[in-house]
Amino acid sequence: MAETLTAIAEWRREAPRRAEQMAREWRLRLGRPYAPGVAGHVVRALCEDGSPAVLKLVWPHREAEQEADALERWAGNGAVRLLARDDEQHALLLERCEPGTTLAAAPDPVGVLVGLLPRLWVGGEGFRSLSDEAGHWLGGPGLAAVPDRRLREAAMHYLGELAPSQGEPVLVHQDLHGDNVLAARREPWLAIDPKPLAGEREFGVAPIVRSSELGHSKRDVLYRLDRLTAELGLDRDRARGWTIAQTVAWMGGGDVIESHAETVRWLLEDV
């Protein structure tokens, strides 16, 4: 983990220079950067014709490997449009969302997602499978490092049970939390920052169920689980199991995200 953080910090120091390089290549005029994410450098830009855009540089990591492919597959249907890509530089030129407020500002954020998810669930051919990712979680160091044995064993149980028994695979955005849906002009709300997999639809609600940006209490979590599964016609038990499994797998090893741990405990109590 320390080596990874050091590598990210070094990459981040170089990111502004690389952004200037991409701006010259794509004939952009760069503006103010957005608040830095965990593994991205994102800057407001104007294209040569004066149209607004976003330049995004991504620190290369497993979950983001097929981000550009997912945006191409969606072609702007419920997600930001991909305007250009440079895979060697891990650079994306994206449609800009304005005003760019996050989904938490919507009167009914869960209702927005009920309408958005089916549009994103297109064919998943060519994307890494959820089964492969489940195997990666089971065999990787992150899950083994989760200190709470009850949470760790629950995640291992659901990964082993759900991965081989999935329904129809579709393209799922495994990080579709409240801050990754933004208000825009072309459409009221657009998804950003895909971490794509090909998996069953029940998995696709996991990041929303645990999205603390949309309210963090047992009542909030179960409301999102109940409403999403009911209105989208999903198997509630499988969606609950996938949420437990992925949330534990994404806790960050020994550096547990406490809100994630609370979400899992609430879901384990819901039997």
Image (spheres, rainbow, N blue to C red):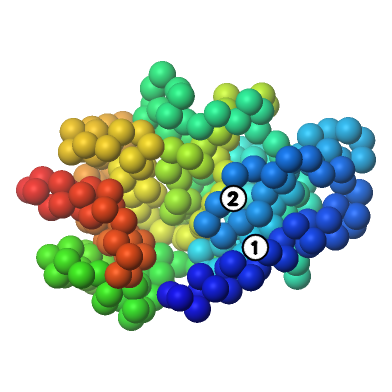
Q: Residue drawn 34% across and 79% down?
A: 141
Image position, residue 137 (x, y; %):
35, 72
User: Does the CB distance between marks 2 and 1 fall below 8 Å?
Assistant: yes
Is 257 left or right of 151, judged from the image as shown? Answer: right
Mark closest to the chain's N terminus, 2 or 1: 1
Pointer 1: what residue?
A: 12
Residue 94 visible from this viewpoint: no
Q: Is residue 59 above or below residue 217?
A: below
Is 270 left or right of 253, judged from the image as shown? Answer: left
Image position, residue 120 (x, y; %):
52, 43
Q: Residue drawn 85% across and 52% down?
A: 23
Is 216 left or right of 200, judged from the image as shown? Answer: left
Q: Could you tell me the amino acid type at mark 1?
A: Arg
Pointer 2: what residue?
A: 36
Q: Tell me the element at label 2.
A: loop
Image position, residue 119 (x, y; %):
52, 39
Q: Tell me the element at label 1.
A: helix
Q: Could you tell me the amino acid type at mark 2?
A: Pro
